[in-house]
Image (cartoon, grey):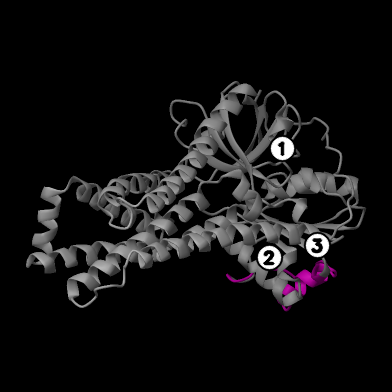
């Protein structure tokens, strides 16, 4: 049954807090060792493809323009393809990689690789056609048309090139701001198509691979490794486990004018291994929405029978989710994210939320291991009478002896994350230190829009909070 906030008068039932553990840096050292290993493998793959090019005489016979252009085309293709596979893996949301880096860091690295990959692909495309044109004594355009008409693999490679350019262009900040999430998501599916279409010309025409068993074995293994990770973790596993656990919408609860909690029920949901602060990719199985999935954080501690997500109405497909019918089947992919207590290093904790960033903060507040007075909650809202989960956060703070500060109202200026008020003469970091005197020696968890998160991070830096004690989860794509 759908309920409004006014109708939802049931007593708030909280999960037991996490057992208290001794907080050390040993866990982080082990984590860093694993990260170093993964990164070393990535760098070694680039070294390997470069070495295969050199061993195969890639820098021999560079006495004329055609041979020089051919060498540039070959090397740029090898490095670009290797980086592209790494880039695809980073955004594939495979659990073992997510546990090492978290979604935000993996996504950021993925974005940083976008332009270098594109530049290398452009260099390969132009250098290869140019080298052929010199050898055949044709202009570049005539040579390109000739290759398209005579070699089918070149047609596939050209389509892959166009798709790749489209993906990179739509990833730029200006384009991303103008595109709805659904359109951006569909366009980025073309990245998989670009990889698949590039394979035939790489295997059949690439002189660094064709007829060379060792090089062929490396590239086939690399492609299979990426493909199997994506097929299992992104496609088969979510469908299989969602069916086994019988996931469906149990009820919806209106939390604010623009936010609704969706309760998803099922069997033995603890086997997902989810923790407070993590998120799932949620796909509701209806005719209009089955092909569109959205990332939503848990807004309450997960239980054996229920997972709760609080969804803000951001004017896109999330508007349809506000009125989803109970009984609707759901497919969950995850859990993802490292915005959890497992990354905690200090006794004291500060939880900072803005708008719909409240769900993971609320879940963390429910289960975090802490004594009274060790946790401070800062909730930035426009209107405290219409803010999602505000009453629950207040109740959790009351029961557990946490400090809570509701920061209500419009900002004092565009660069500030604090509301205008009686302390306007003080800077943001001064106001933060006044509210939380021990903020420099606490772990700080921040969840909200990207601009808000960055503003809080700037205040924390000025307040003296070390970078390794700042944990973020941004609602950005």
Nearer to us in this view, 9 or 181: 181
Across and down, in percent, residue 23 comes to 86, 58
Answer whether labels 3 and 1 touch (C-beta < 8 Å).
Answer: no
Identify the residue under disc 3: 25
Marked residue nearer the N-terminal end (3 or 1): 3
Identify the residue under disc 1: 273
User: Which residue is at a point 83% across and 44% down the rendered structure image?
Assistant: 395
Across and down, in percent, residue 473 comes to 64, 55
Q: Is residue 437 above or below residue 203?
A: below
Across and down, in percent, residue 29 comes to 75, 62
User: How would you classify the magenta stretch by its main secondary structure?
Assistant: loop
Numbered circle sitting on residue 419: 2
User: Which residue is at a point 18% across and 67% down the rendered structure image?
Assistant: 131
Q: Is residue 432 above or below residue 45?
A: below
Magenta run includes residue 294: no
Q: Quadrant of residue 27?
A: bottom right
Q: CA distance from mark 2 to mark 1?
A: 38 Å
Residue 156 is left or right of residue 271, and the answer is left
Start and end of the magenta stretch?
414-440
Q: Quadrant of residue 129?
A: bottom left
Magenta run includes residue 435: yes
* Number of the front mark, 3 or 1: 3
Q: 10 Å neighbourhood of mark 2: few (<14), some, or many (≥20)? A: some
């Amino acid at each position: 049954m759908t309920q409004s906030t006014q109708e939802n008068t049931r007593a708030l039932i909280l999960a037991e807090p996490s057992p208290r553990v001794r907080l050390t840096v040993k866990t982080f050292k082990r984590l860093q060792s694993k990260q170093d290993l993964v990164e070393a493998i990535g760098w070694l793959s680039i070294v390997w493809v470069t070495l295969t090019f050199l061993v195969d005489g890639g820098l021999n016979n560079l006495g004329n323009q055609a041979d020089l252009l051919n060498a540039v085309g070959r090397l740029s293709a090898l490095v670009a393809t290797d980086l592209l596979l790494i880039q695809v893996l980073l955004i594939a949301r495979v659990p073992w990689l997510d546990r090492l880096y978290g979604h935000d860091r993996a996504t950021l690295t993925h974005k940083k690789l976008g332009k270098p990959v594109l530049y290398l692909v452009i260099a390969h495309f132009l250098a290869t056609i140019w080298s052929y044109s010199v050898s055949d004594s044709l202009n570049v355009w005539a040579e390109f048309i000739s290759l398209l008409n005579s070699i089918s693999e070149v047609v596939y490679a050209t389509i892959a090139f166009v798709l790749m350019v489209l993906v990179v262009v739509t990833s730029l900040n200006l384009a991303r701001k103008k595109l709805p999430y659904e359109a951006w998501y569909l366009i980025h599916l073309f990245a998989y198509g670009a990889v698949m279409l590039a394979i035939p010309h790489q295997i059949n025409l690439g002189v660094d691979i064709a007829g060379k068993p060792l090089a062929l074995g490396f590239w086939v293994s690399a492609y299979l490794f990426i493909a199997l990770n994506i097929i299992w973790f992104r496609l088969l596993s979510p469908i299989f486990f969602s069916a086994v656990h019988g996931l469906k919408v149990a009820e919806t609860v209106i939390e604010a004018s623009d936010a609704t909690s969706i309760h998803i029920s099922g069997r033995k949901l603890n086997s997902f291994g989810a923790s407070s602060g993590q998120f799932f990719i949620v796909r509701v199985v209806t005719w209009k929405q089955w092909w569109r999935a959205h990332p939503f954080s848990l807004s309450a501690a997960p239980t054996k029978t229920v997972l709760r997500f609080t969804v803000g109405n951001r004017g896109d497909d999330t508007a349809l989710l506000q009125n989803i019918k109970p009984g609707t089947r759901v497919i969950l992919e995850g859990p993802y994210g490292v915005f959890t207590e497992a990354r905690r290093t200090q006794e004291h904790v500060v939880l900072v939320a803005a708008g719909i960033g409240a769900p993971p903060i609320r879940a963390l507040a429910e289960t975090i291991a802490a004594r009274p007075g060790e946790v401070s909650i800062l909730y930035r809202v426009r209107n405290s009478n219409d803010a999602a989960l505000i009453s629950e956060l207040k109740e959790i703070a009351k029961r557990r002896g946490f400090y809570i500060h509701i920061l209500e109202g419009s900002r004092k200026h565009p660069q500030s994350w604090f509301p205008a008020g009686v302390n306007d003469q003080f800077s943001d970091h001064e106001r933060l230190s006044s509210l939380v005197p021990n903020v420099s020696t606490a772990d700080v968890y921040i969840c909200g829009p990207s601009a808000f998160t960055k503003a809080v991070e700037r205040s924390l830096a000025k307040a003296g909070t070390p970078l390794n004690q700042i944990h973020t989860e941004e609602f950005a794509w």
